[in-house]
């Protein structure tokens, strides 16, 4: 199948593209800097120089494709407050609309929309799943405009859409490396608050496998939460990383200091309780996480980072 992956140079997009290529799919990667996907080009990806902010580039990228995936998100590395995340949300909505508009013009190409489980906010003492109410917190606020729009399109059945809603995704590169591994290596990493809040995570390669299955099965009109089997206290996740790195146990910092240093949005995300079930993905998508818990996946991520 010929699949266009927007955001294929990014943390998740590059793994998704590599997974699709390894399973015999033809992958089109529209990117601003072809050098960033040189490795994928060497594996057979069709690389096009283009910008998701340009309608003509989106149209050209989708030409001849049978499926489109959006994994492109405006950059949010660094300190993030509510004002900045609002601007990111607006730009992300532009990405989504451009892709959906051109996919419809190209004959109704199915589009896999990527979201994060933080669109459901705090789970309290319960669990989230695909039926949970939209109450975004943390970086889930990026979906404040786009998620209701996509949900409406799906309810009206006016576009062939599939939603993959992934938990905090960890692995080499991405936030896990620059916001946890690098800081821990320098002895600077701290949890915000006491770290007792429970979170759901998922390893990057397991996310890529979910996208492959979605491409091959095309369960149009469905949404799937992609998370591993074992929610974990934030401080236990961090200490699993510290052990894998041979570092001492992690210390904490008050939330108000975290707000000043990292921004309120990051602190909000990393201090909420957020348990998510993966039952539907297993039953209807046939997905099974290779790394069913953080205890299996985190040491693998550390080895991959250190091998580079």
Image (cartoon, grey):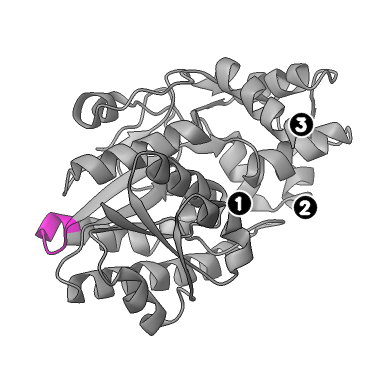
Name above or below for residue 289 compared with residue 25.
Answer: above
Q: Earlier in the sequence, mark 3 or mark 2?
A: 2
Give the image location of residue 90, x and y in percent: 46, 71
- Dot 1 and dot 3 residues touching (CB under 8 Å): no
Dot 3: few (<14), some (14–19), or many (≥20) neighbours within 10 Å? few
- Dot 1 and dot 2 residues touching (CB under 8 Å): no
- Please give the name of the residue rendered at 16% of the width and 48% of the height, measured from the top-left corner: 220
Viewer-nearest residue: 304 or 221: 304
- Residue 26 shown left or right of residue 244 in the figure: left
Q: Which of marks 1 and 2 is nearer the N terminus?
A: 2
Span shown in magenta: 154-160
Q: In which quarter of the image is residue 241?
A: top right
Give the image location of residue 233, x and y in percent: 59, 21
Residue 93 visible within the image: yes
Which disc is residue 265 wearing?
1
Give the image location of residue 111, x and y in percent: 26, 58
Viewer-nearest residue: 287 or 79: 287
Q: Which of marks 1 and 3 is nearer the N terminus?
A: 1
User: Which structural element holds mark 2?
Assistant: helix
Q: Mark 2 points at which residue?
A: 260
Dot 2: few (<14), some (14–19), or many (≥20) neighbours within 10 Å? few
Name above or below for residue 111 compared with residue 179.
Answer: below
- Please give the name of the residue rendered at 68% of the width and 23% of the height, measured from the top-left corner: 235
Residue 191 visible within the image: no
Q: Quadrant of the C terminus?
A: top right
Q: Nearer the viewer, mark 1 or mark 3?
A: 3
- Please give the name of the residue rendered at 46% of the width and 18% of the height, measured from the top-left corner: 292
Q: What whole-number distance in Å separates the C-alpha atoms at marks 1 and 3?
A: 29 Å
- Residue 18 shown left or right of residue 126 in the figure: right
Q: Name the residue under label 3.
A: 306
């Amino acid at each position: 199948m010929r699949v266009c992956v927007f955001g294929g140079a990014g943390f998740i997009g590059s793994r998704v593209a590599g997974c699709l290529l390894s399973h015999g799919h033809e992958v089109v990667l529209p990117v601003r800097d072809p050098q960033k996907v040189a490795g994928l080009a060497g594996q057979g990806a069709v690389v096009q120089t283009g910008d998701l902010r340009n309608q003509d580039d989106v149209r050209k990228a989708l030409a001849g494709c049978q499926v489109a995936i959006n994994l492109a998100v405006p950059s949010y590395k660094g300190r993030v407050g509510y004002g900045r995340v609002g601007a990111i949300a607006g730009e992300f909505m532009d990405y989504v609309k451009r892709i959906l508009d051109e996919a419809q013009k190209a004959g109704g190409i199915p589009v896999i929309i990527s979201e994060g489980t933080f669109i459901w906010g705090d789970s309290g003492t319960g669990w989230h799943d695909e039926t949970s109410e939209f109450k975004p917190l943390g970086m889930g606020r990026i979906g404040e405009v786009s998620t209701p729009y996509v949900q409406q399109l799906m309810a009206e059945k006016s576009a062939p859409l599939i939603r993959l809603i992934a938990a905090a995704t960890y692995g080499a590169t991405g936030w896990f490396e620059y916001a946890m591994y690098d800081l821990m290596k320098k002895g600077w990493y701290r949890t915000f608050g006491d770290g007792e809040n429970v979170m759901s995570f998922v390893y990057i390669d397991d996310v890529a496998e979910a996208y492959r299955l979605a491409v091959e099965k095309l369960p149009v009109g469905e949404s799937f939460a992609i998370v591993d089997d074992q929610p974990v206290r934030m401080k236990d996740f961090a200490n699993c990383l510290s052990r894998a790195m041979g570092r001492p146990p992690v210390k904490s910092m008050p939330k108000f200091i975290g707000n000043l240093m990292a921004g309120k949005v990051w602190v909000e995300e990393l201090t909420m309780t957020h348990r998510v079930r993966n039952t539907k993905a297993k039953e209807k998508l046939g997905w099974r996480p290779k790394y069913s818990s953080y205890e299996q996946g985190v040491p693998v991520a550390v080895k991959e980072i250190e091998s580079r």
